[in-house]
Image (tube, grey):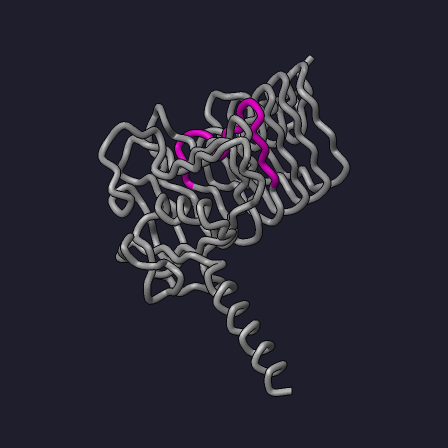
């Protein structure tokens, strides 16, 4: 009986040890020589945490506070502060999250402020964001909050927000997929989400709201030729375009499947439905 009990206890300790390493922590004042497996031993850069997570099949990274160009140690030669580049063999999803109900100085933010870069770019990897903000892209050439292409699939889960970027909030290019599952794309200053040829947008819950477009086709969601958008829930509201459509603009040759969702209270050019417009 004692031997059986010892075996059970040993198994429990082993399981607990493995489980404890299912999360890596990142903080700007951390150290990349740390283990990253606890809040008291955080890594410094998200790039190191992402690499370690992929190599060790860890599926969660917790960000504490703001990470930016300075904390990542980026000098030049990048188009984005955070590059999530995987391979075609990467099939598992990595959750990048902030702490739920974090104090003000611990709220998770991925920022491109004071740089000529976009915050996030990726390909060939699956990432889910929760309880985190992606913002601060102010560049005229790289003013995109989240750039998804070449096999990257991103899910914006609860508490995730892409906001305050001077160009597109999210740009989805060839073979990129964005799932909005409780997250928000808001207060961007060109178009909230643009889906180009080969790109896919799926929305089940969450919001695309209060984006403002000047002299472009759409403020909320622009589906270019060859792009696909399916909405079953969530809301696209209060987006404003001075010379286009506030809500959803569907180009000729694009696919728009609406099975639910609230698309109202958008504003745009006089003479066209400001909520949904199909180009002919």
What residue lies at 71% left-to-right and 41% top-to-bottom? 261
Q: Is residue 145 visible?
A: no
* Residue 172 on the magenta segment: yes
> Measured along the vertical axis of the image, is residue 264 above or below residue 172?
below
Residue 167 in the image, given as x and y percentages of width and height: 42, 29
Residue 165: quadrant of the picture: top left
Image label count: 0
Question: 52 or 273: which is nearer to us?
Answer: 52
Q: Is residue 44 visible?
A: yes
What residue lies at 44% left-to-right and 34% top-to-bottom? 85
> Measured along the vertical axis of the image, is residue 236 above or below residue 213?
below
Question: Which segment did they paint magenta?
Answer: 164-179
What residue lies at 29% left-to-right and 52% top-to-bottom? 32
What residue lies at 36% left-to-right and 33% top-to-bottom? 80
* Image-based side of 99 in relation to 222, left or right: left
| Quadrant where the image shows the C terminus | top right
């Amino acid at each position: 009986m004692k031997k059986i009990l010892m075996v059970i206890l040993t198994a429990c300790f082993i399981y607990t040890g493995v489980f404890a390493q299912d999360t890596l922590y990142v903080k700007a004042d951390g150290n990349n020589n740390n283990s990253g497996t606890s809040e008291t031993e955080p890594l410094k850069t998200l790039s190191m945490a992402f690499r370690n997570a992929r190599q060790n099949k860890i599926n969660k990274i917790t960000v504490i506070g703001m990470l930016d160009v300075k904390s990542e140690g980026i000098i030049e030669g990048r188009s984005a502060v955070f590059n999530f580049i995987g391979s075609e063999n990467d099939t598992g999803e990595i959750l990048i999250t902030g702490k739920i109900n974090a104090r003000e100085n611990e709220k998770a933010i991925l920022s491109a402020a004071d740089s000529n870069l976009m915050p996030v770019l990726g390909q060939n990897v699956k990432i889910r964001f929760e309880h985190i903000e992606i913002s601060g892209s102010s560049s005229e050439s790289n003013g995109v909050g989240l750039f998804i292409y070449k096999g990257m699939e991103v899910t914006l889960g609860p508490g995730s927000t892409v906001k305050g970027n001077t160009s597109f909030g999210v740009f989805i290019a060839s073979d990129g997929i964005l799932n909005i599952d409780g997250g928000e794309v808001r207060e961007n200053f060109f178009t909230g989400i643009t889906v180009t040829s080969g790109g896919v947008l799926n929305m089940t819950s969450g919001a695309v709201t209060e984006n403002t477009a000047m002299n472009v086709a759409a403020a909320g969601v622009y589906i270019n030729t060859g792009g696909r958008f399916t909405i079953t829930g969530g809301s696209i509201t209060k987006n404003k375009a001075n010379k286009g459509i506030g809500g959803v603009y569907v180009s000729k040759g694009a696919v728009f499947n609406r099975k639910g969702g609230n698309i109202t209270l958008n504003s745009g050019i006089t003479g066209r439905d400001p909520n949904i417009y199909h180009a002919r």
